[in-house]
Image: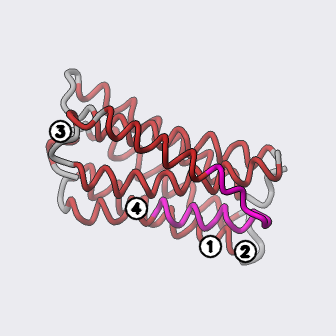
Amino acid sequence: MQESHVGHPNRLSFYLGLICTTVLLVLIWSVTSEWRASVVWSSVALGCCLIFTWSFFRQTKCRLSFAAFLLSCCAFSLAFWQHILYPVQWWLPITLIALGIVLYLLFLPHIDKRMTAVAVLGMGLLGLIWSASGWWLQARSWNALEASVGAALWFVVFFRVMVYPGQKKLDQLSLVTTCGFLVALCLLVAAVLPAHP
């Protein structure tokens, strides 16, 4: 991600992102009495989100921001895969990949300078949506629904930042984008909390 993707976001978005992610990381271990794979992978994802928030909003290292966001998607995917029973429904990833290709081609003129970054991060997010949706299709539980909604909202926030980077009123939009990112993060974490019914 390059500097042009975010312009100069306000400090409130930066501090809000760091504080909320840190609180979620503390919360997930304060209500967990045992080491479960989904909790460990969610903690790894939150740690990556801390790195992503710091590097993205400070605009220090775009490669670090890129890698941290991709790793957080993969870690949340692994957390949700712990709840999925086999057999896997293969129609879901095929549908998601087809939808991703259509969106990619439709918005190609807007992402011409970031084609590779959008493709790689998009595949990471499609993997997250696959795992969350696959869990919901099997379990039909409230936790799985929260994971699916959180993954979809995370994709929408990613889409907004990568496809429409140069909007006017950037400070206001960046705060809305940050809030959307944090709401999605809260839903993803709430889905794996053991105390959550």
Classify residue 93 as left or right of residue 55: right
Classify residue 36 as left or right of residue 157: right
Q: Which of disc 3 and disc 2 is earlier in sequence?
A: 3
Q: Are marks 4 and 3 in contact (CB under 8 Å)?
A: no
Residue 66 part of the magenta-drawn span: no
Q: Which of disc 3 and disc 1 is earlier in sequence?
A: 3
| Front position among marks 4 and 1 | 4
> CA–CA distance between discs 2 and 3?
39 Å
What residue do we see at 49% from left, 58% from top? 22
Vertically, is 35 above or below 145? below
Q: Quickly name the residue at label 2.
A: 36
Report the disc number at residue 70: 4
Residue 78 part of the magenta-drawn span: yes
Where does residue 139 sit, x and y in percent of width and height?
83, 52
Q: Which residues are magenta?
A: 72-92
Q: Which is more toward the observer, 168 or 137?
A: 137
Vertically, is 133 above or below 82? above
Q: Quickly name the residue at label 1.
A: 40
